[in-house]
Amino acid sequence: MDKRIRFETKEEANARREREFLALTPHERFMWFLRSFDRPGFPARHKTEDKGNFVIRKKHDPVR
């Protein structure tokens, strides 16, 4: 994604980001999804009730 500063409305920014995301290949979209877990602001891990949902969690230790 482009990191340049832009002056646009929220609606314009959301539309631009959606167009850019949809222009990615399925593989690039999946990789973007996985990288999104490393971004600041992702909710802290906390124990919640088991609702039977499929959950992907990233391990904190490096892969060996």
Image (cartoon, grey):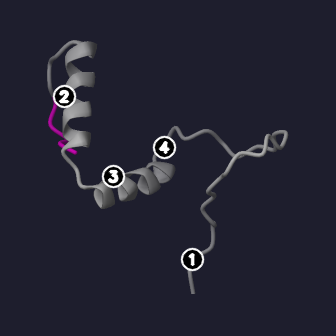
How far is disc 3 from disc 1 in space, using C-alphas? 23 Å
User: Which residue has dot 4 on it?
Assistant: 40
Q: In the image, what residue type sits under mark 3?
A: Arg
Which mark is first along the chain, 2 or 4?
A: 2
Pinpoint residue 56: horizontal percent, then vertical percent: 61, 56
For the point 56% across and 80% down, which residue is it? 63
Q: Earlier in the sequence, mark 1 or mark 4?
A: 4
Q: What kind of residue is marked 1?
A: Pro
Query: In the visual, does 44 lie left or right of 47?
Result: left
- Return the residue at label 3: 29
Q: Which of marks 1 and 2 is nearer the N terminus?
A: 2
Residue at image mark 2: 16
Which residue in the protein does label 1 denote?
62
Is disc 4 placed on a helix, strand or loop? Answer: loop
Residue plotted at (63% across, 66% down)? 60
| Quadrant in the rendering for residue 27 | bottom left
Left or right: residue 33 versus residue 52 is: left
